[in-house]
Amino acid sequence: MNFLKRLNYKLYKFQRFFVVILFFLLLIIAFLQVFLRLFFRGGIESADSIIRYLVLWIGFLGASLATYKNRHINIDVASQFFKKLNKRLVSLIVFTISFAISILFLVAAVIFIINEFGSSNKITFIPVWIFELVLPLSFLFITLTFLQKFIESIVYFRKGQ
């Protein structure tokens, strides 16, 4: 359990740093693209595609960061629907379902990347599937976070029994 907490924390710190770097890179490329188009009637080849993928990376890694900090979109239907049940049990059910769904998304993202291996699409000289690796990576980070919360809810539930 402590290993998973430390791992998630280190991944959180890395993601936070990486998102800042990606955001600055996004700003620089976008500024250069606008500047070159305005003053030199040209631009950076494939800059628009690179910007699109940078936004994808920032968005998915941001979702992973939000999940770690428990600031993700929360659907509070479970606590309203199960008002009479034990709060610890509801927490266990919610984290079990969240963990299971994140595993499904992780598997779907891995299958998507495997299918993209066969594609010959490239941005400049880089295969597109490399830019799309954020999908399984972010879902892996989210799954690890929900695994930690799932285990914590089991421990919390057992203490209450």
Image (cartoon, rainbow, N blue to C red):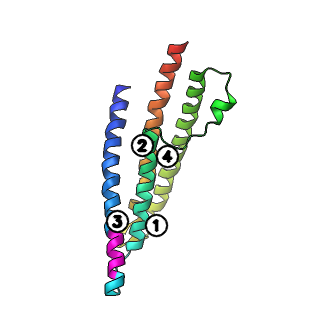
Determine crowd level at label 3: few under 14, some 14-19, many 20+ residues with C-alpha closer than 10 A.
Answer: some
Q: How many marks?
A: 4
Instruction: Determine whether 70 is above or below 48 in the image.
Output: above
* Dot in front, 1 or 4: 4
Amino acid type at mark 3: Leu
Counting residues from the start of the chain, the first of labels 2 and 3 encountered is 3
Identify the residue position indicated by label 2 in the image: 141
Counting residues from the start of the chain, the first of labels 1 and 3 encountered is 3
Identify the residue position indicated by label 1 in the image: 119
| Residues at marks 1 and 3, CA–CA distance in whole angstroms | 29 Å
- Mark 3 and mark 4 in contact? Answer it, CB < 8 Å: no
Determine crowd level at label 2: few under 14, some 14-19, many 20+ residues with C-alpha closer than 10 A.
Answer: many
Counting residues from the start of the chain, the first of labels 1 and 2 encountered is 1
Residue 29 picture location, percent across and down: 33, 70
Counting residues from the start of the chain, the first of labels 3 and 4 encountered is 3
Query: Can residue 21 be seen from the camera position used here?
Result: yes
Amino acid type at mark 1: Ser
Q: Which quarter of the rendering shows the C terminus?
A: top right
* Dot in front, 4 or 2: 2
Identify the residue position indicated by label 3 in the image: 27
Counting residues from the start of the chain, the first of labels 4 and 2 encountered is 4
Residue 113 or residue 53, whichever sits in front: 53
| Residues at marks 4 and 2, CA–CA distance in whole angstroms | 9 Å
Counting residues from the start of the chain, the first of labels 1 and 4 encountered is 4
Determine crowd level at label 4: few under 14, some 14-19, many 20+ residues with C-alpha closer than 10 A.
Answer: many
Q: Is residue 102 magenta?
A: no
Q: Which mark is residue 106?
A: 4
- Residue at the location (47% across, 30% down)? 149
Stretch in magenta: 29-36
Amino acid type at mark 4: Leu
